[in-house]
Amino acid sequence: MKRVNLFPLTRDCAQLLEISDGNNNTFVLACFELISSNSKAFQMARGTQLKIYLANGTVTGIRHAEIVNWTGQAIAVPRIHVKDLTDWEETQRPGVYFLFGFDSDTGKNLVYIGEAEHIQRRLQQHIAAKDFWNEAICFTNKDENLTKAHVKYLEARLIEIVMSSNRYALDNDKRPPTSSLPRGDRDAMETFIDSIRVVIGSLGHKLLEPKVIFDAQETEAQQKSLLKLKVKKIDATAKLTDEGIVVLKNSQALPEVQKSLSNGYTNLRANLREKGLLIESGDKLIATDDILFTSASQASAVLLGYPCSGPDYWRDAKGRSLKEIEMEV
């Protein structure tokens, strides 16, 4: 359990008592505002328990997933088993669904997001209407309280989030407007989306996760944690994440590739240029969006165009290499 040092708060409250001249109301209000502004010190990350049922005992078959004490549920189904959902009452009600596959032109992950009042029937219709997908994941409610207005709101918001994260290409031709809901229902659906994000990511699709998260209240500390790559007049900035390292938008890269760069990294770099994530700007290349790499060495090699040790090249604001940072206890 994380220990929280209460001394700064008690000290500051004591000072506020002096300022308040003994006025209890003023003192209480001032302390409340002080504690509220420091509330992050009391926040601790809570774990989430996810339960997954494998219908036929394999991880590639139909799976039912739920978060403990959540009213929602997910059913992941391979395309070839959609017909088996006729025996799953969980899919015979309103909900939202994702169809997953690959874009034949770009090779990028492709997703279609939809809503329906009867999920199983809609998925069966997509067997004939869409051929790109090989897996569907649908979300419904156990207590059957999701209405048409709710699922239309979820559909619109999920499309918005996927477009913002820019991890998957979107097969939807139109972006539906967000349906109007009472304030309480809207907040309930946003909470529902938070759970969808956890479940669908755990099922192998992180399309709702931003590549990198910046908290406005921690800007200064986050700036200090950023890593820099400064070689041969290029300047790149990156942030370590749970998935690897994200090179931030507007970072620079060298325009040429050396013969010593591996075929895999050469192809990756070419792919980034083809997708428009690295574009020419004078005598450099510029990142047009945040780019996720699996390792610091992969990131530095692709940006520089030759093999190098990422842990030695990436450095923080104090000049320490990533290797030195990782060695710290």
Image (cartoon, rainbow, N blue to C red):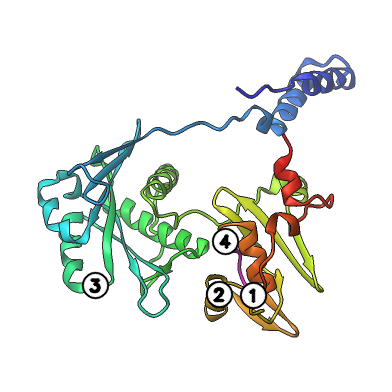
The mark nearer the N terminus, 3 or 2, is 3
* Residue 155 horizontal side relative to residue 269, left or right: left
Residue at the limit of the structure toward the front, as seen here: 260
Q: Amino acid at mark 3?
A: Lys
Residue 272 numbered mark, or none: 2
Distance of mark 3 from mark 4, alpha carbons?
29 Å
Tell me whether the residue at label 3 lies in contact with that at label 2, contact meaning CB atoms closer than 8 angstroms: no
Residue 130 numbered mark, or none: 3
Corner quadrant of residue 96 = bottom left
The mark nearer the N terminus, 2 or 4, is 2
Magenta residue span: 287-291
The mark nearer the N terminus, 1 or 4, is 1
Tag nearer the camera, 1 or 3: 1
Q: Amino acid at mark 1?
A: Ser
Q: Position of residue 216 (x, y in %)?
A: 69, 49
Residue underneath mark 1? 260
